[in-house]
Image (tube, coloured by chain):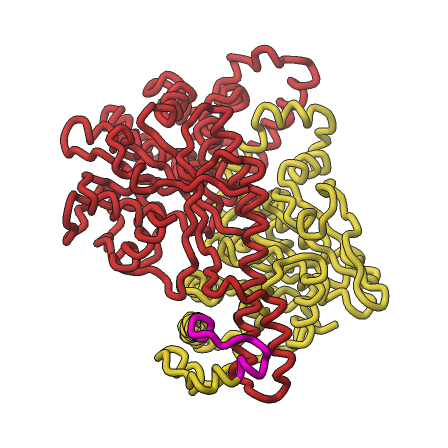
Chain colours: A red, B yellow
Amino acid sequence: MTAPRLDIDGLLDDRDVGVIVCCGSGGVGKTTTAAALALRAAQRGRNVCVLTIDPARRLAQAMGLSELDNTPRPVPGIEGGHLSAMMLDMKRTFDEIVEAHAEPDRAQAILENPFYQALSSSFAGTQEYMAMEKLGQLRQQSETGEHWDLIIVDTPPSRSALDFLDAPKRLGSFLDGRLIRVLAAPARGAGRMSARVLNASLGLFTSAMSRILGAQVLRDVQLFVTSFDALFGGFRERAEQTYAQLQAPDTRFLVVAAPEPDALREASYFVQRLETERMPLAGLVLNRVQEVRLPDLSAATARAGAERLGDEHTLVAELLRLHADRMETAARQENVARSFTGAHPRVPVASVIALADDVHDLEGLETIGDLLAKG
Amino acid sequence: MSNRAPNWSRVRLHVVSGKGGTGKTTVAAALALALARGGKKVLLLEVEGRQGFAQLFDTAPLPYQETKIAVAEDGGVVYALPVDAEAALLEYLEMFYGIKRGGYALRKLGAIDFATTIAPGLRDVLLTGKASEAVKRGEKVGRPAYDAVVLDAPPTGRITRFLNVNTEIAGLAKVGPIRSQADSVMGVIRSARTAVHLVTLLEEMPVQETLDGVHELHEAGLPLGAIIINQVRRSELDGSELAMAAARSLPEPELRAGLQAAAIEPTPATVNALEDEAADHAARVALQNAERQRLVDSGQPIMELPLLPGGIDLAALYALAERLHEQGLPA
């Protein structure tokens, strides 16, 4: 079964597409893909902003991102349209949300709260959630001032692509969770779950926690929740809104993977999830695919040939063995990709061959862009 | 400066970290198989809830209990345990505070998220605690439960914070059971019983992250083990052949003669394609060599594992274990 080809240029030229979100598990080349797409879209005349998460140092430099200041900066030397690039600073983004919504005194109190500091810098999911918040800000900015007609988003390097979609819910239900309410304001009670066993356990838990961690920590939590409530009237609501923007009609998802079982398994989960959530998938980008330059010479024939040479013609024997390795790698990758396409026959795919060199300049990104477009 | 592996026969806890996508779980599994050779008993721990070992060893998802997962020569055995922070915390609360029932309800309420968020080091203490407990089990009676414990740890970017639980928890808990737990964990992690190995590929970003990791671990006084380079492309072409391949100046008459002798029709297209492949290969080898040099310059012991064109299956894990063994792992 052959997958339909993903028409990258068609996607980048489509004026109805305002946001492209690149998702995938860690180590599959998401950041490079996002940057290459952004550059190509700009060169094709669009006004693009790319939000990257953690680019390699030299790639960041190539895009003029020498400092991490959480603001889009124009990338010089682009012909056609415009390209701005930024790197996400998750703590800074969280701080800015607080500053934008609270009176200076209250904002200061929240920012200095140790519980807030732990939450904004190390809660699993904060980075993902802040990438989404930043996307919302960029969209707004785009309506009022600087106009971008395409925003391309790279997502954090989590082990699972689903972490990105799960983050708002995780953060929202954590901050609005019953436990946090009970601990913060014991008078309100545990609500529906106030079975006797639970209350007994909860009492023990609370006292254990304050013994383990100290009473001050619980006071910090209480203060934080009260101030935060006053700001947002419940974080869950905000998280739901942030999530909902991903369902906007101008948003498309691209799943990025490498032709390895783990990465494609993750991609497969993600595709199913998008279907459930009715979020539009543009297609799959398959990075680092083994290029085959001589498909007619099979691995078996090449190996047999190398064998036949024995100690003679060692150079040719080695080239034949390298070719056989290459054919075997390609065959294995094809198998893995085929099982993905078997499960998702309608998902368009663009394959990008593995390059010998790392990408760290605009020229390299252009090459990747060309390969993406050829699919 | 030698990059040869030192004597690790005293090391009982092998911590394996690496950037995402470098194959650290595969390497951890191969390391466990290598350590189990000669009738040893080894425990493999995973802490990121991804059931990576079940997939690698092609079994059903593992329960939260030590389960036999593979055998090695002379009766060696590898057990695996996916450590779950929630289960560990509940175990812990039960042990110290007698909270037995209601564990499920606490979990539903988000108690674990809560506890581990207000104290970011807490989750790590629970996870590393399990590793150090497994190392120490039976030591006092002179019969350690496991000859070695291999921990598939978080990625390089987080490894120092993960292992340095004492510092992380210090600001929160000055006394009490969590504090003594952290102290006892650090007692194991900082000792000569532990080695932290970093898995990398010979590519720019993973190598940079590895070098940063080496620096951080060193600064934190944590015991570095080896840099394990994964997926190395072999090359039997010599320097001048590689140079000719890169310059696309391989001797074509020899290529044609060789192909002829190999009973492969030396059409211009075939010769040309082989030259292209040779040029790709030379470029990769050059990149590999440059990146390897950066690792060698760090002075850390280095072990290498080959890229296996057939991918990773059970047989491949044993092959990788063999390679680790050859490069100086004690059996």
Q: Is residue B55 left or right of residue A232?
A: right
Q: Which is nearer the eye, A98 or A348?
A: A348
Q: Is residue B198 visible?
A: no
Q: How many marks?
A: 0
Residue A100, horizontal then vertical, whole percent = 24, 27
- Image quadrant for the N terminus of chain A? top right
| Residue closest to the far top | A192
Rendered position, A23 above or below B323: above
Q: Residue at x 39, y 48 (%)?
A: A375
Quadrant assignment, res B246: bottom left
Q: Residue at x 36, y 35 (%)?
A: A130
Point out the stretch of residues depicted in magenta: B258-271
Residue A248, horizontal then vertical, whole percent = 34, 23
Residue A274, horizontal then vertical, whole percent = 47, 29
Q: Residue at x 42, y 74 (%)?
A: B268
Rendered position, A97 above or below A260: above
Rendered position, B197 above or below B83: below
Q: Is residue A137 left or right of residue A308?
A: left
Q: Is residue A276 visible?
A: yes
Q: Which is nearer the eye, B157 or A44?
A: A44
Quadrant assignment, res B261: bottom right
Residue B31, horizontal then vertical, whole percent = 67, 64
Please tell me whether residue A233 belongs to the stretch shown in magenta: no
Please tell me whether residue B268 belongs to the stretch shown in magenta: yes
Q: Residue at x 53, y 80 (%)?
A: B259
Rendered position, B32 above or below B298: above
Quadrant assignment, res B64: top right
Q: Which is nearer the eye, A200 or A8?
A: A8
